[in-house]
Image (tube, rainbow, N blue to C red):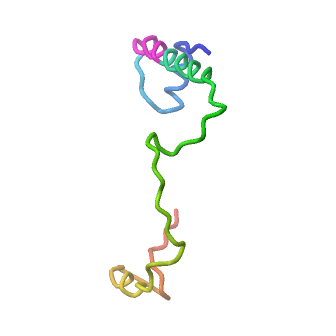
Amino acid sequence: MSVDKKTVAKIADLARIAVKEDELAPMAGELNNILDWIAQLSEVNTDDVAPMTSVVEVDLPWRDDKVTDGGYRDDILANAPAARHGFFTVPKVIE
């Protein structure tokens, strides 16, 4: 895939990034280099490679899935400017 100046201008418009006309050609070259690198990565055989969560082999610690905190509703609502029926109260917004 090749990116030209027109495509770079469209991408910049979609991303709402202001790109000057004289910056489009160099940016197209940079994007083409990135796409070429991605194409090289897709050529690598990864069939026998297990998915990884980190580059370092680490076992994450497990914990019991249980509620360890709670029961502080009244303390938390004491900091609220307004509360009603155990919930935060906010002003009504109508446009």
Residue at image position (46%, 86%) is: 84
Residue lying farthest left? 79
The correct choice, above or below, for 60 with respect to 56 in the image is below
Q: How many marks?
A: 0
**Which residue is pictured at 54% across the width and 72% down the height?**
65
Determine whether 60 is above or below 90 in the image.
above
**Residue 68 percent across, percent down from the top left:** 45, 78
* Residue 24 position in % (x across, y down): 45, 15
- Quadrant of the rendered image containing residue 6: top right
> Residue at 48% of width from left, 82% of height from top?
87
Quadrant (top left, top right, bottom left, bottom right) of the N terminus: top right
Nearest the camera: 34 or 7?
A: 34
Name the residue: 44% across, 30% down.
17
Q: Nearer the viewer, residue 60 or 39?
A: 60
Most common secondary structure along the magenta stretch: helix
Q: Is residue 1 magenta?
A: no
Q: Is residue 54 above or below residue 7?
A: below
Left or right for 49, reference 25 = right
Q: Is residue 22 magenta?
A: yes
Q: Which residues are magenta?
A: 21-30
Residue 12, image x and y in percent? 49, 26
